[in-house]
Image (tube, rainbow, N blue to C red):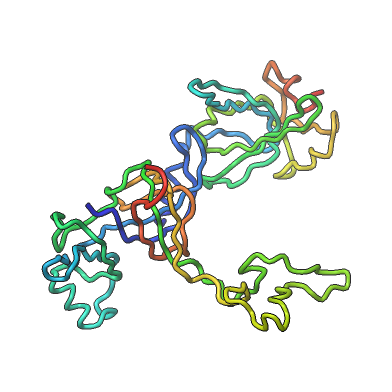
Amino acid sequence: MNVLHTFSATQKKAPENVAKFNVGDTVRVHFRIVEGEKERIQVYEGVVIGRKGSESPHATFTVRRVAFGEGVERVFPLHSPRVEKVEVTREGSTRRAKLYYLRSRMGKAARVKGKGKDTSAKANAASPVEA
Amino acid sequence: MVTELLGKKLGMTRFFTEDGRWIDVTLLEAGPCTVVQRKTRDRDGYEAVQLGFGEVKERRLRKPQQGHFKKAGVALKRTLKEVRVEAASELKTGDEIKADIFQPGDRIDVSGTSKGRGYAGVHRRHHFGGGPETHGSTFHRRPGSIGQSSDPSKVFKGMRMAGHMGAASVTTQNLEVVNVDVAKNLLVVRGSVPGANGGMVIVKKTVKGAK
């Protein structure tokens, strides 16, 4: 590995700190927000519709949710120190790596098949059905 | 004190700052530069040090050049550059200048040779708009009119036309130093610097900009 790669690799989180989740999962992303002097943690919940970069230090993931009837997608850097943790509230089962087809679907059609039983209490509210 | 270094552009990557922002950075291998010659007012008419950077095989240098390094008692260097210093400067032949002359937060200028683009048209070279691509147009990427008529009967100097583009000396001013690793001779600079990866760059304290 050359200097450039070695340097980039230092930007990665330790393997045990990297969030583990798959495409199709419903997740709660705890994202640290700095407002002036203060710092708080904002939770963003939605379905992971894609992961990019796999092992790269520049890896990102996209989380989609429908807020007030409007689809919102946020891209998070996987190794960002601002991403405090990623909780998986529901495991999804998908046949493709990118769930971009969800964008053109509304309501019940925009669901992802679940993998087995849903354990979280917020399960139903957390499912991508929303609205 | 010398505020200038020779270096090499290693490439670009991304960096998480302490407050979690994701910024684009360029890695530079800056120094170590060896003082190959000390020029003085008495002998040369001005005060300067000659800095050398980069390893080079013996057979790459001609005998007189090899002799220059041998006289200074330093290893052979690929590149030489003179930097002005004050008369009181205590730098002497053989001294090494490292990346620690810069601190995170410092502002620097980085000069390099930009990537060569060959013979480029006005579209690419001067960002001309060009004509329509379709609808019967045959006026695709042409420059258009380059002047008037029998008065003045000439094309004015400086008219922007097609020609050789790139491979010229370019300086990017007022870049922020994000990180310095003296052990690895690494400078992490915010933003981009001229030239291809592996290209030679000159890093110096900014002449304009903040502070």
Which residue corresponds to the image point at 31% horizontal and 53% vertical from the top-left?
B185
A119 horizontally vs B95: left or right? right
Q: Where the C terminus of chain B falls, by quadrant?
A: top left
Question: Looking at this view, is A73 or B72 the one in front?
Answer: B72
- Image height of A26 relative to B75, above or below: above
Q: Residue furthest front?
A: B151
Can you give x and y, in whole percent of width and height, for residue B154 in the image? 64, 82
Report the number of discs.
0
**Residue B127 percent across, percent down from the top left:** 65, 64
Relative side of A79 to A42, left or right: left
Displayed quadrant of residue B133: bottom right
Q: Nearer the viewer, residue B49 or A127?
A: B49
Farthest residue, direction top: A121
Relative to A109, does residue B108 appear above or below in the rendering? below
- What residue appears at the point 69 percent right and 76 percent down from the top-left corner? B147
Whether residue A7 is visible to the viewer of this picture, yes or no, is: no
User: Horizontal placement of B7 versus B117: left or right?
Assistant: left
Q: Is residue B46 above or below residue B184?
A: below
* Residue A63 visible in the snapshot: yes
In the image, B126 versus B149, the foreground residue is: B149
Q: Position of residue A62 (x, y in %)?
A: 66, 38
Which of the 4 image quadrants contains residue A119? Answer: top right
Q: Residue at the spot x=62%, y=76% of the render?
A: B162
Q: Residue at x 70, y 73 (%)?
A: B143
Give the side of residue B95 with respect to residue B169, left or right: left
Image x and y of residue B100, in percent: 27, 48
